[in-house]
Every structure is written in structure tokens, then in C-alpha cells.
Image: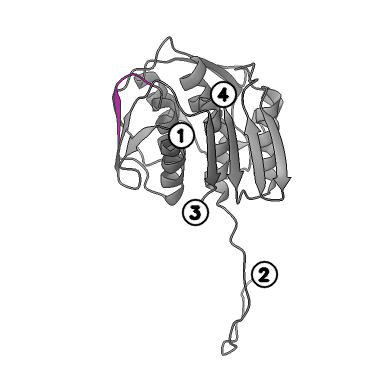
Amino acid sequence: MEKLVITGGTPLRGEVSIIGAKNSAIAILPATLLSNGVFTLYNVPNIIDVRLSCQILEAIGSKITWIDKNTLIIDNKDVHSTKVPLDLTSKFRASYYLIGSLLSKYGKIEVGLPGGCNLGVRPIDQHIKGFEALGAESNISQGKISLNAKKLIGTNIYMDIVSVGATINIMIASVLAKGTTTIENAAKEPHVVDIANFLNSMGADIRGAGTDVIKINGVERLARKCNLFCCS
């Protein structure tokens, strides 16, 4: 298609249902792993990426029940593994959010290198930089990423480039870290704010989301139950 021709002058009428943002949902789903509780998410976009996120969570022990087309319940009481199936994560770019969640909650994670759509080079070096600054040791080999940390410790992290994924992932990882983490040159997109609002509703202490400086004061634990109208 070379062009679109649009003839104006016709009044618009009717109603459109606005479903939650995909980029928020695919980060909120793994972020629930920070607590072994039960969560109800409303207005969730029922799309392939969300379904795949649910499949990955179920593979490590989460129980997911769809109440209707756009409402689901996540029960994380029986999460039993920090080794995420490589064949699932390699299909999906945003599988890297599992790293921040499981590393923060359990101190270790093994996940396949994120795959997904071929949109050019999208390295995860800023994610790894942030995790290592928090005290994790990383190893990337044979198509997988492994990280371990006895305890994540809050610190100052300057993002070399503005990265939405890395900002969200480091924010997730910092929630249960000891002390205060400051992310400078942070991404300011709406879904960064969505994730911060979700985490704060669980009991996190995140300030500055939506600006280029985000501060996360680590907490000992998060709520075991939360209801959320999902995503802007």
C-alpha cells in the first residue's frame, strides 16, 4: 500500500471500548511474582503476548484463571521454580521481566534469551548493568541468562540510554532490595507509571515514576492480595 486517501466531513458516532495497554500488562503479570499471593487483574488485553505470559507463569507454578475475556486471577502460592522453560521465553521479548521479579523475590533466575518479533538489535545490557549494580552475578551462555544474588542492595544507577524495559525491570528488582535505589535517566512512558502504581498498590515505595529520576525504597515484603484495573 502506497497511500491512504481519507475523505473527511462525516460525523463520527458510537462507542469504543478501550482495553488495557499491552506493554503494561506484560510487565504487571511477572511483577505479581514478587508476592506469593492472589491477584485479580481487570481490563487485561486478551492477546497472544498476554496469553504467552500466562503460559510462562503457569510453567513455574502460578495458577491462572480467566474469569471473563479481560479479567483474570493469578494465584502464586505454589510457585516452585526459578528456571523458566527456554522454549517459552525465547518466543517472547518481554520475558526479561521475569528476571527482575524472580531475582528480587528468590535471589536467582535462569531464563532463555528473550526472543519475539524481529525489530532489529535490542540488547539487554542496561538490564544486566542494573542487576549487577544491585549486587547480582550474571552469566550469559548457551542461549540463556542466569543471575544470582544473596541479597540485592539499593544503589544509584544511571541508564546509559533511555530504556523503558530496563527502567521497569530494574524498578521491579529494586522493590525488595535493602535500602534505596535511584534510577537516573529513567524512561518516562505511561507504562512505567502503570507498573509503579501496581507495585505501590502491593506495598512498594516508588516515587518519581513518569520523571527521569525514580527512587525506590526497598520494603521487606509485599501484600498477598491485590485487585487492579489493569493498565492505562
Q: What amino acid type is highlighted by mark number 4?
A: Asn
- Does residue 174 appear anywhere in the picture? yes
**Magenta stretch contains residue 231:** no
Task: Please tell me whether mark 4 sits on a helix, a strand or a loop.
Answer: loop
Which residue lies under the disc numbered 1? Answer: 202
Q: Amino acid at mark 2?
A: Met
Provide the residue designation for mark 3.
232
Q: Which dot, 2 or 1, sits closer to the camera?
A: 1
Whole-number angstrom distance, CA of label 4 to CA of label 1: 12 Å
Q: Which of the two labelled residues, at mark 4 and mark 1, occupies the earlier sequence position?
A: 4
Residue at the spot of label 2: 1
Q: Position of residue 171 (x, y in %)?
A: 40, 32
In the picture provided, is 201 more to the left or to the right than 74?
left
- Considering the image in quadrants, where does the N terminus appear? bottom right
Snapshot quadrant of residue 179? top left
Disc 4 target residue? 36
